[in-house]
Image (spheres, rainbow, N blue to C red):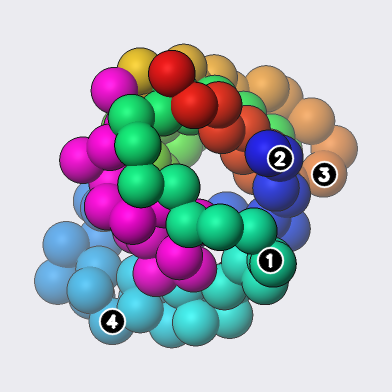
Amino acid sequence: MRFIVDELPPSANKFRYFNSLKKSWIKRNLIIHNLKTIDKPCEVKISFFLTNKRNDIDNLLKCVFDLLQESKVIKNDNLIYKLFAQKIISNEEKIEIEIYLI
């Protein structure tokens, strides 16, 4: 399955405000789907399309995992057994998420 999110998550570097920023970002970007929640090990490929290269990829990943779980795409982010993440410099900021059962 494949999803596109049009807004980048907050960075975990903003530690003091991170939890409230993350909650509001998740609320704004809940993934609406009519698929069965994944409850088996899976592989996730995440492409971050960024307008600059300043963002650390590891700071962006946690929010995306939480979004997948809150949207009931996956039952728990501990089911992600394999991960591929990349940054792509682009004119448009977005996130492309692909999930495959293992």
Residue drawn 35% across and 37% down?
Answer: 40
> In x, y percent, where is residue 48?
60, 34
Decide if residue 55 is in sight here. Answer: yes
For residue 63, above or below residue 60: below
Q: Residues within 10 Å of mark 2 (few under 14, many from 20)?
A: few
- Residue closest to the eye, 40 or 49: 40
- Residue 15 located left or right of residue 62: left
Decide if residue 59 is in sight here. Answer: no
Type of amino acid under label 3: Glu
- Residue closest to the eye, 6 or 39: 39
> In x, y percent, where is residue 37?
48, 57
For residue 98, above or below residue 88: below
Instruction: Please give the range of residues in magenta.
Output: 64-81
* Residue linked to disc 4: 20
Label 3 and label 4: CA atoms lie apart by 25 Å
* Residue linked to disc 1: 33
Residue drawn 71% across and 25% down?
Answer: 89
Mark 1 or mark 4: name the one nearer the start of the chain.
4
* Residue linked to disc 3: 92
Type of amino acid under label 2: Arg
Whether residues under marks 2 and 4 lie with C-beta atoms below 8 angstroms apart, the answer is no
* Residue linked to disc 2: 2
For residue 49, above or below residue 33: above
Residue mark closest to the camera, 2 vs 4: 2
